[in-house]
Image (tube, rainbow, N blue to C red):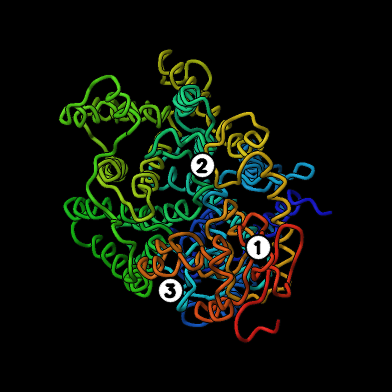
Amino acid sequence: MNNYTIIDIAGAFEAAALLAIFFLPPGFLLGYLSNVAGFRTRSAVDRFLWSLVLSISISPILAVLLVRFFSLTVASTLFLLAAAVAIALAGREFFSMLANSSAPRKSTRVALCMMAVWVLLALLALVDWQIGDRLYVSYVAYDHSVRTILVDAAARTGVPPKNPYFGFGGAPVLRYYYYWYVICALPVHFAGISPRASLNGSVLWSGFALAALIPLYLKHFTQERENLRFKSVVGIGLLFVTGYDLIPFLALSRWLHALWGDMEWWDTNQVTSWIGSFVWVPHHVASLIACLTGFLLLSILADDATLRERTWTALLAGAAFSSAAGLSVYVTLVFCVFAAVYAVIVMVAEGPNKLFTYLGAAAFAVLMALPYLHDLQGPSTAGSKFVFFSFRDYPVAQLWLQRQGLNNPTLLALSKVPTLFIVYFLEFGVYFFVACWCFRRDVRNHWNISLRQRASRVMFAVSLMVVTFLASSTTGNNDLGSRGMLVVQFVLLIWAAPLVSELFLPQGRSRLGTVWTITLSFSLLLGVLGTLLQVGLLRAYAPYVDAGLSPQTEPWIGRAPGFGKRTLVLRRSLDAMKAKIPRLALVQYNPANDYLNVFHLYADRQVDAGDDGCGATFGGEIEKCKQVYPYISAAFNRPRIVDAWNIDQFCDQLQIAVLIATDADPVWKDPRSWVWTRAPLFSNTIMRAVPCGSNTQR
């Protein structure tokens, strides 16, 4: 029988290859047509880097608008045509370069090796791990079970996607940032790959694109000229370095006598490692890339640029900013606050001429985003707030202080300040010392820095202030504080690359003293070990708990022991079931099932109620869900009540076409229930899918 680990790896590679159509040719064509940043005169490597970051930044808004006003088929066809034209334009030059090429430089070989390491780490963190008769999902399935079904929704319903968790009365429009899922849906639509494979493939591209942005920022923004290739390789290598997270993680794990599935979860307002952001939230990383690409285009625009150059720059930057909003509203909000502050600085320093280009980009971004902004006007989850003032805290420290007898509210509130400083020190690790070095250097130079250097300082300070003093609650977590921090992290990475490269210079050439050399080296080691620990935990948590080696802290993966065997059978059952159920059929499984995330990962169908809140966070009225959910839950969990129902009338009222039961549902154990009195579309020892509704032939 097929091994799912091999299937998932092959699917991720296939998806990554198909996604290349959307993540390389559009940027090449736009760069070639506009000649932005002197694209046509750049080296082949520069053009590749620009093509990648421009595509990641602009393809999302292009895809969304094409699908919205035309269809998935039209959008896919146009992107394929763009790929053909790009290949034709670049083909002759490519073969000429290949004929005259020499052996790749050492820095290029090292960069390629790091790309290979990234692919291995990403696949290790993402794919299912089949061991004999057991199947273990990675811990990132906690989020990917949500994202996979959103990709499927975009592939089924187009733009705007419909909420796949909320089906009764007609699925509502997705009130969420969905641009990344539309891009992932295109290869699902035209090539028939699975939504999960497409999502996994997109993770690989998010890492490639951010790596491509590093040398561009070092060259054009911080204007590094000496040893640029080497510093770029160091900057890319820093993507594998996180903070001191392994120290508090190990301490809290020992205190609680249990493992968590992700090292980052020691801090409720986490500063996520780069690898963690790539595998958990590639769309937030893509939003960061779009914001930074748009800003880079504007910042390198020459003072004597022609009207044509200014127009193209404004259009491309505006499209990138518009994409960013639909990829992550949290990252975009933080960047917008910085951009507003920096616009004032530009007006004072350079006059209104350049400011007009910035304003033109902003106006074009809003214009392109208007349909998406309209989608966001749908009903929201009661009590949630997109943004509000809240000082970033660490609840574990507050709890510890209370246990030590500190109960004065004022003193507890004041204790948040030194606590936050300690938490930031642990979260940033080597990057904390990089910030200290840069600040000390600027003070010694009496803040005599260029406008672009000033921009990075403003970007760092403003973004850090926003994520420290503002929070969000629309998804139950402070996504603004966690994902908006990506802007701060990128600035620190760009500052760190030249400084850390000093560690690798011959003795006597480095500007670093012994203390700084030891401090940075030790911090880098802890940061790399932390990243390896994180990837290992994501992969090992499920089998570790299933083997009884740790208490189970996360029941969403199934109830231990034995969930590995059950997950394998469920995935096989759902794969077989999908072949017998129409793609657009509305199905319903038990929304209170311990294996609900497994269904979300593999079912690929619209449901009436995906959970006890019907996914109303993503669109729909929570009050309607509260009225209907008890009946849907009862259909699976209250067999004595359901026996008296007219089940076809129940399904007709909720537009359900197929009911799916498992042997864990109470209704399964009632021989008089709908599970056993209706001819199944699919059936085995643990799952039955039966047709339902007045139009169903029984």
Q: Where is residue 570? Give x, y as percent.
A: 69, 55
Q: Residue furthest bottom?
A: 695
- Quarter of the picture containing the N terminus is bottom right
First in sequence, mark 2 or 3: give its number: 3
Q: Amino acid at mark 1?
A: Asp
Q: Nearer the viewer, residue 94 or 198?
A: 198
Q: Is residue 364 visible?
A: no
The mark lying in front, picked from 3 and 1, is 1
Q: Is residue 149 visible?
A: yes
Q: Residues within 10 Å of mark 2 (few under 14, many from 20)?
A: many
Spatial separation of the CA atoms under disc 2 and disc 1: 45 Å
- What residue do we see at 58% from left, 74% from top? 586
Q: Secondary structure at mark 2?
A: helix
Q: Nearer the viewer, residue 507 or 206?
A: 206
Q: Is residue 244 above or below residue 46?
A: above
The mark lying in front, picked from 2 and 3, is 3
Spatial separation of the CA atoms under disc 2 and disc 3: 31 Å
Q: Which image quadrant for residue 358?
A: bottom left
- What residue do we see at 30% from left, 65% from top? 362
First in sequence, mark 2 or 1: give its number: 2
Residue on which the image places disc 1: 670
Disc marking residue 172:
3
- What residue do we see at 22% from left, 22% from top? 406
Task: Please say if the residues under marks 2 and 3 sit with CB atoms less than 8 Å apart.
Answer: no
Q: Amino acid at mark 3?
A: Pro
Q: Secondary structure at mark 3?
A: loop
Q: Amino acid at mark 2?
A: Gly
